[in-house]
Image: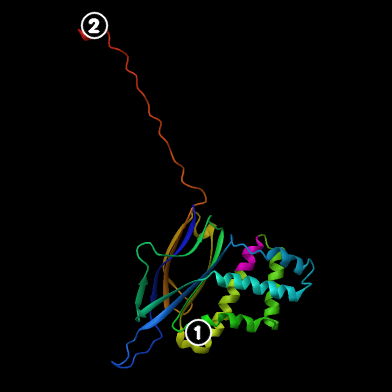
Amino acid sequence: MPFYFRLNKVKILDNREKGFLFFIRDLAEVKLTSMIVSGNTDFPQIAEYKDAAGTKGVKDIKRCRNLASSMITQVVSQRQTMVIECVRDNQSITFGDTGYVVHQEKTVPDDLNWFFIAVEDDSAIRNFGASIESIVGSSKFDTFASSIATLVSTAANPGFAAGTAIVKFIAEVTAKALKKNKDDTIGLLYMSLNRWEHYPHGERKANAISDLSGNMFVDYSLFGFNQPAVETKTKAKVIRIPPLPVSMLD
């Protein structure tokens, strides 16, 4: 049975939109962006990355940079984005009685990392690709690419280890870009879950989870099983009653 990660409700305290007396309404157009990397996420670049990393340190940093950039692009391309219009201060945004699926897989993952951001002005999100490209080639990106090389060479699950580092890197880059205009940042949430601690039975529901700024509260749930439900068939039983003695029929 598939695994579902749902967004159920988002409450925003300050929508970062300022009204002016009675002439401008205090309403905002809010953009919600969600990115999830799990233990099941497949990065085709991992095998090539191991070759570029080598066994005694990075032997081809240029190749590692290109592969790291490709992996970041893969994660960003799988993001879920929605636009909510006319959002007021202290408003709760709900998604019906079933929630909105932001991530789905064929099986229950052992781990997952979730990055969720709400902005009033999505220029930083729209220019996200340019922000990533501006870091490629810098010493900071070289360090990041080298750290990915170490992870894929030593981690038990190199795909998830690399994915975790990539989501964290994306969160840091996005937060830095949004600092240029703090009034447009509504909320930023980054969290990690593992199956053993947080959803041992394939199910979890959490409400009013505060973001990093305390301006946004999120309700989410996840659900799934690795094996389909077992269909139980009950076999009909036939009870045979022996004929009554003739003496009892008289």
Q: Position of residue 174 (x, y in %)?
A: 55, 80
Residue drawn at (64%, 66%) of the image: 161
Three-letter code for the amino acid on which mark 1 is drawn: Ser
The prevailing secondary structure element of the residues shown in magenta is helix
Disc on res. 247: 2
Provide the residue designation for mark 1: 123
Q: Hey, what amino acid is under mark 2?
A: Ser
Direction left: furthest residue: 250
* The residue stretch that appears in magenta: 157-163
Q: Which mark is residue 165?
A: none
Which label lies toward us, 2 or 1? 1
Element at badge 2? helix
**Gap between marks 2 and 1 measured at Cα:** 97 Å
Residue 18 on image: x %, y %: 37, 89
Residue 74 x, y percent position in the rendering: 60, 70
Circles 2 and 1 in contact, beta carbons < 8 Å: no
Q: Quadrant of residue 204?
A: bottom left
User: Magenta stretch containing residue 167, yes or no?
Assistant: no
